[in-house]
Amino acid sequence: MVLEVKKKERETAQSLIRRFTRALKESGILIRARKTRFKKREKSEQMKKRAALRREEMREEYDKLRKMGELEE
């Protein structure tokens, strides 16, 4: 989407900038740009499974160390 603001006759630079920023806010371009900029990719099913298995392995390892007294609570 293109936003175009042309200077009117006898319009100051400040009022032109003010008009441009108002038009930019109303168009929603900035909001859409921010949403896409910080969008996170979804993890694939395989990556989710690997992460779950790793968490389970680490939990078992911590429980084992805690029972042996090598890990302080």
Image: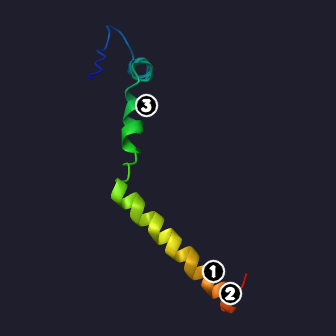
Amino acid bearing label 2: Lys
Say which quadrant the N terminus sits in: top left
Foreground: 46 or 23? 46
Amino acid bearing label 3: Ile
At mark 2, the secondary structure is: helix
Mark 3 or mark 1, whichever is nearer to me: 1
Q: Where 27 falls versus 49 (above or below)?
A: above
Q: Do tag 1 and tag 2 residues touch (Cβ < 8 Å)?
A: yes
Picture disc at residue 63 = 1
- Label 1 and label 2: CA atoms lie apart by 6 Å
Residue at 38% of width from left, 18% of height from top?
Answer: 16
Residue at 62% of width from left, 87% of height from top?
Answer: 65
Amino acid bearing label 1: Asp
**If you read the primary sequence from the N terminus, does the residue marked by circle 3 or circle 1 appear first?**
3
Residue at 44% of width from left, 23% of height from top?
Answer: 25
Label 2 neighbourhood size at 10 Å, few (<14), some (14-19), many (20+)?
A: few
Instruction: Please identify the quarter of the rendering in which residue 61 is found.
Output: bottom right
Picture disc at residue 31 = 3
- Label 2 and label 3: CA atoms lie apart by 52 Å
Q: Is residue 70 left or right of residue 9?
A: right
Residue at 67% of width from left, 85% of height from top?
Answer: 66
Residue at the spot of label 2:
67
